[in-house]
Amino acid sequence: MENEDSVQPAETPVNPNRTKFHFVLGMHRSGTSAVSGLLEGMGLSVGKAVLPSGPDNPLGFYENSAVVDFHDRLLEEIGSTWHDPRPLGKRIRSLAPDRIAEWRDELSGIGSEQFAPGRPCVVKDPRLCRLLPLWEPVIAASGVPLVTVLRHPAAVAASLSARNGFSADKALMLWLVNNLEMERESRAFQREFVLYSELLRNPGSVCRRLQQRLNLPEYDVDDLIRTRLRPELSHQSETWPAASARLRSMCETVFEILQCEYPSQGTLDTVFLEYEEWVGWLPDEFSGLAEMNLHRELVKNAPEPRLHLEVFADRGKGYNQSASLLSEIVRDEWQTIRIEHLERLQPNPERKLRIDPVNRSGFVTLSSIRIFREGDGTLLYAADTAEDFRKIELMPGLVPCFGKTGLTLLAMGHDPQMLLPAFGPLPGAACTLEITFKMEPADAPVLQQFRELHDLRAQHEQLRAENARCNSRIGALQDAVESAVRWQRGSWFRKAFHRWRPPKNTWEG
């Protein structure tokens, strides 16, 4: 059944780079990241600005952050958000043609800036389910099937409720409206449906089918599946939550139809009209836009979090908050922090003390670390030289910036850690940890530049050392040649040549 209300594709494709775009569509928490990660491993580019991974998706989202920002701004202009359960098609179609052209021009600019000409790429963002009319020219120019990922509505609802705190009713409404609008707006194009449960059950077959349908180069997918697909990260079951019976019935119908080889468009349209009428009474506040704006203001005006240093002891089962001591610190000033009664941590003498010098990213310049007995000042541990600091084990979140001094460190992220060498059991008397340092907070881009500079310096030092070794070898070889020439000049050379040996250390290095 033809969708009469859909926006007609533009006559001129918006594809200035002639880059072949592949699209992955699907509701939030439906497995689109897993599919996009597999396609990226098969050679498709996500673009320059890649959205970083998060706690809810540790393997990565495989989304271009410029595209996601574009979608969020478009939704905000039409008075909506990604978690608005009301259909958006009419609001998008109500935009003036000039405004639609402006959005498509901006989309063209993003494509030119983010994706390399001539290299096939993948565009994935769950918001695409409801914003396809803006992408129609690009989809038409790509000429490849849309990959649409489908997951059981109960599992999606459970995942959304766990991550975002949505009620079961709202989570199911979001599943329903995203899948209905995705199906309606994609009817004019070829589609390749991927069932998430099938991907987990038989990933090799799904990957090879995608390779064939998308005309991708032959690729051994076994290693790719092991690194990009982690079934154990899928925690939600397909048990229906306590929600509206009418809503559950609509979700069951749509889920069953979308699994068919030829989905019944008439039935889907009937469900869509029923749903549209059912949620028509929802107020604008239900879109979540006011909530999003409030969150932005709170983030913008939030006070800077307090900085602190924390010390942990390993009691044999790792480090945890129950065995730690904390002290607040100030920024941009040299300070001496004293943490008393270190003996209360009762560290295992065979293990190490852990120091988290700060709780955010920045520069940490250390001057000294001491542990002493409070009663008589007996020194139990001290580090105040470059040699001492090199004995401290630095975890990945704490990177030495200048190797020669061993004092200045880059604290990457909010949880940098350092482990002091094991120095024996603490005495029963009270003990104090004293650390003198300066903490200078910095944003991630600044830290990244300094880390890259540090890496370049390290590479430069390695090259210098290698150059010195080569020069030493050349010198030894020159000495050998000169020695042989001196032997040759001797009148007894021919008789005694078999006794000549190159100088010592000629071939060493």
Image (spheres, rainbow, N blue to C red):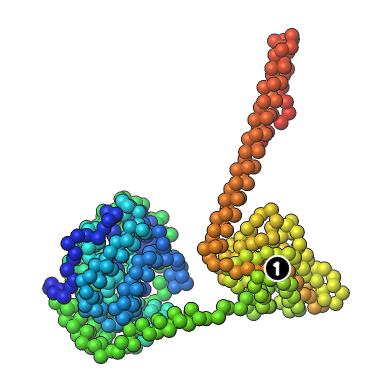
Residue 284 in view here: yes
> Where is residue 74, by image quadrant?
bottom left
- The C terminus is located in which quarter? top right
> Where is residue 442, by image quadrant?
bottom right
Q: Could you say where residue 482 lies in the image, as x and y percent from the top left?
A: 69, 21
The amino acid type of the residue labelled 1 equals: Phe
Identify the element where label 1 is drawn: strand
Q: Could you say where residue 183 lies in the image, as x and y percent from the top left?
A: 22, 72
Q: Could you say where residue 107 lies in the image, as x and y percent from the top left?
A: 30, 64
What's the residue at 76%, 78% (across, down)?
341
> Where is residue 333, by image quadrant?
bottom right
Counting other residues with Cα less than 10 Å from the Cα at mark 1, is it few (<14), some (14-19), or many (20 or more)?
Answer: many
Residue 204, compared with residue 322, is above or below; it is above
What's the residue at 57%, 54% (across, down)?
453
- The N terminus is located in which quarter? bottom left
Residue that label 1 marks: 437
Q: Could you say where residue 231 lies in the image, as x and y percent from the top left?
A: 40, 67
Residue 256 in view here: no
Residue 413, compared with residue 155, is above or below; it is above
